[in-house]
Amino acid sequence: MKKRIPSLSSNFAGLISENAWYVDKTNFIQQLEDLNFKYLFFLRPRRFGKSLHLSMLEHYYGIQHKNRFTELFSEYYIGKPENTTPLKNSYYILKFNFSGVLTEKKDQIVPSFINKLISGISQFKKDYGILENPELDDIFQDKTAVGVFEGFISGLRQKGFEGKIYLLIDEYDHFTNELFAFNTEHFKEIVSRNGWVRKFYETIKTYMGEGIIDRFFATGVTPVTLDSMTSGFNVAQNITLNSDFHNMAGFTESELRGMIENTIYEKGKFDLDVVISDMRSWYNGSKFSKDATERLYNPQMVISFLSAFSRNWKYPDEMADINVTSDYKKISNILAPLSHDDSDNIITEVLNTDRIAERLTIQYNFELPYTKTEAVSLLFYNGLLTIENAVVSMYNYVIPNYVMKQMYWEFFRYKFTMEKELRYDNTKIDRSIMQMFTEGKIDMLVEYVHSILKNLSNRDLQKFSEKNIKMIFMTLLMGNNAYFVKVKTKTMKVMPTFC
């Protein structure tokens, strides 16, 4: 019986109950338990399947799901008797999700963070019924993150709690990354020295030492926050670059093929090899360890595409998920601390060659200057660049796929129009591309580029070269589904998207 294409839900039990296809990642449970480390950080770009992985761990280890073990896991690797571990369904799960913490105003951050703690603790009470509402109300009166967490643990002890907690934290750095982008001083203030974020994790470390928190698994995007509070939370291991866990989030090509074959594929409806080949160009290419042997597909991009494609066996008008491409301003945030020249050099090199060579920053130190190396590394951690290969300590980074390439051009277009005070006429651009597609002519496109050049100042034109003109053409051609645009060192090649 065919299964359904999974929704974008991050609830493991929900996917199973709705007969949706789950790409089996349960073999990593064994690998995680075999490590000498019980406290782990795992970093991947947004929308890469991290939250679903946490939900899977929650349902495997949570004592409240013991009676559903066969229902949830029997079809998967860890559900086979020879693969099941002794720790299954043996923990009390405490889960926090720090995405959505408000950062626009400084006085919003702590209350918003505490609300996330309250949400996680309330779910713990709902799952296990150990604390009563009046007791929780007293705990939640505290106005500090440390106070709320300490009050919760103290309340458990007063009830004679003797269990072991598995602490799961989703998007540990979501709100601090936001701060890092636009308020670096406040970021430093809260995560280092005597900052309250650092104090919160020091409190967790204390309870790890006392044994009440027995395991810890946190996801995020970058190591910046972790590195800033290293001395306060030096018990955790970062497995992000470990090739053994490279495929723990994201889809390999064989996993993608298996999902299509077991959900929507029927012989004669479409050519499976052609569809996968096209998806490879758009959504594949991510590599997070220099020793990894496979490149990964972005799960959200893949699922969004397949959901649209399965309606009428036609490719959607928008091949790039708007929720992904709308992230192009992240590039601006990452490059903002650099000098104008360093920022321009990175963008120019990446856009003209699709690649850049740099070291990889493993640990961020804010006592040292923020340089091109740190910026390129953050582009990597955010999935905007990926590893091609590495020679000694020098990494060769490339744009992973066509969706990410569109993001760079969207960013450049935004930056170019802001700096030059230009306004693009989308109607004329669309007509120019339509003329190319239907008549094989470029007259309208050339005329429109000429009109852009006429609006530039003499100062701008003095610095112009063939490279700059090529980049203007690219900003106009990217973002449509009529053509793939391939950039080589000295030439630009435009060809139909699906030929």
Image: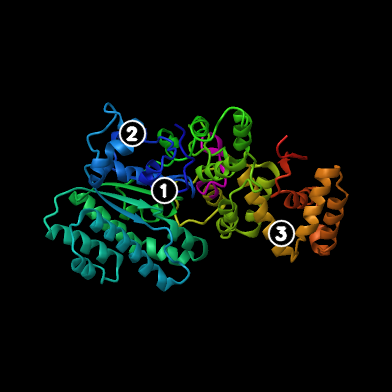
Give the SS element for disc 3: helix
Q: Which residue is mark 1?
A: 10
| Of the pair 478 and 60, the residue shown nearer to us | 60
Marks 1 & 2, CB-CB < 8 Å contact = no
Q: Which mark is residue 31?
A: 2
Give the SS element for disc 2: helix
Residue at the (41%, 48%) spot, across then down: 10
C-alpha span from label 3 to label 2:
47 Å
Looking at the rendered structure, the kind of residue marked 1 is Ser
Q: Position of residue 67 (x, y in %)?
A: 23, 41
Q: Position of residue 192 (x, y in %)?
A: 37, 61
Left or right side of 96 for 250: right
C-alpha span from label 1 to label 3:
37 Å
Q: Which residue is mark 3?
A: 416
Looking at the rendered structure, the kind of residue marked 2 is Gln
Between disc 3 and disc 2, whose residue precedes?
A: 2
Give the SS element for disc 1: loop
Q: Which corner quadrant of the image does residue 391 belong to? A: top right
Q: Looking at the figure, which quarter contains the C terminus?
A: top right
Looking at the rendered structure, the kind of residue marked 3 is Phe
Q: Position of residue 382 (x, y in %)?
A: 52, 49
Between disc 1 and disc 3, whose residue precedes?
A: 1
Task: Write the start and end of the magenta stretch as one range.
Answer: 379-396
